[in-house]
Amino acid sequence: MGQRVDKDRYSEAEFARFGERLAEQLAQLHELLARPGFGTGPTTIGAELELFLTTPDGHPFPRNHEVRDAADDDRLTLELGRFNLEANLTPLPLPGRPFTALEREVREVVAKVDAAAATQGGRAVAIGILPTLGELDFTHETMSDESRYRALSRGMRRLRVEPFRVRIHGVEKLELEVQGVILESANTSWQIHLRTPPADFARVYNAAQLAMGPVLAASGNSPVFMGRRLWEETRIALFEESADDRDLERLGRRDRRVAFGSGWVSSAEDMFAACVRDYEPILPMMTFGGEREAAGDGDVPRLDELRLHQGTVWQWNRPVYDPGDGGHLRVEMRALPAGPTPVDMVANSAFLLGLTSALAVEPVEEFPFASAYRNFYRAAINGLDASLAWPGREGETPAADLVKDLLPVAAAGLDRVGVESGESGRMLEIVQERVTRRRTGSVWQREALAAAGGDAARMVARYRELALTGEPVHTWPR
């Protein structure tokens, strides 16, 4: 979705031609993945951080164009909602001390956006869902004035003529209908990319699928939406339902456009092929017309149409093809929330990457996929109170206990990929303390909201004040 989209209306003929181009590029990808040595190289990580812009009193501040221009930083891009910005961070080698460098850059970019927002009368906040959002924040006027987002909205409406219905039953219940995809903008995330050789892709991807449940249980930061207490990670339900293109003609498709998946995968190529087979295009932009496309780095095809289409199918873990650096594949891990602080987000990343690395050498496919699936959604609903299954364990284990048991496994996984022990130890200790004290971002928000008498704006102001200290959320007072 980061590619430039040059217009917002497309004909049926353009949709048809785009589908043909996708088939052509799947064949090119097949040839490329069979090329000896393709995609090998150093293990690197990258990250994307989505931020909310707020007024000084904690309400949405729909001025992302102006804030981006004031920041004047190529790492920043507009998001769907005018109160959101995204920062694309610098890729880093995984061996050594990646988390120190990543934390430093997150601090720097958040401070830069905050300073730019201040010039416009606003603030920047890293939080999974902004609790002060209301129904009037989800109108056509609050969508970013960009061709790609207008085209995205029209493309989704082409597939689904019915309203988008959101039903989330948590501590309280939320039911609403909207006519477009603007509710997606209520969610902001912290996304981790892991460069992966094609031969290892399936086992790393499957390991990430299994790892995500307990990591998500320890990382919740989105408990409230539109004044209602819902899931520990309400983003999961809200994003899935607000971008569900399955209307009456598509109810036979198992997965929503945002989904965890329905089985262990066998290869990256199969995942790209399934994406083309199962999901109709919504952004049929042709980058090179009828001509042969230009090559990327190392004379590999760019596959721009395939990449664009893949960017409009939002699996919680998804494959990424990048023509840069000679061409390579990445596993993009998308389920973690933004916030509360840079060190919290980086600690979550260390836990996820370490556990994924450790599990990638195990036959995780022998574990029932249905159990990994349940783990993910139970973690999103109940956080540390969830009951999770795990390979080698009888029955189910409370998530808080399982996380503590898995932290040494994650440490061994980070050691396996060359992360310095002091580096991994510092990050995993933050997760350990958070779980021991049972103080996730979601727990803090619920308690602070109660202390503020239900005043969401007051809670957001306190949240931002404490986030600016940089101290991890488990140390925060109400």
Image: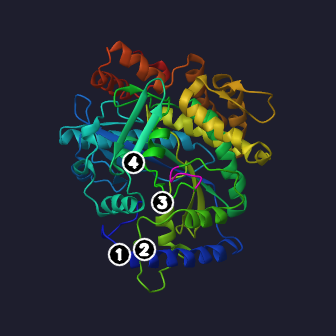
Q: Look at label 3 and name its amino acid.
A: Gly
* Residues at circles 3 and 2 in contact by the CB criterion of under 8 Å: no
The range drawn in magenta is: 253-258
Which mark sits nearer the N-terminus, 3 or 2?
2
Q: In the figure, 318 relative to 352: above or below? A: below
In this rendered view, identify the residue nearer to me: 354 or 214.
214
Name the residue tied to disc 2. Answer: 15
Name the residue tied to disc 1. Answer: 11
Which mark sits nearer the N-terminus, 2 or 4?
2
At numbered mark 2, what does the secondary structure look like: helix, strand or loop? Answer: helix
Instruction: Tell me what residue is drawn at x 57 percent, y 29 percent.
Output: 218
Mark 2, residues whose alpha carbon is within 10 Å: few (<14), some, or many (≥20)?
A: some
Name the residue tied to disc 4. Answer: 164
How much space separates mark 3 and mark 2, taking CA atoms? 16 Å
Circle nearer the viewer, 1 or 4:
4
How much space separates mark 1 and mark 4, taking CA atoms? 23 Å
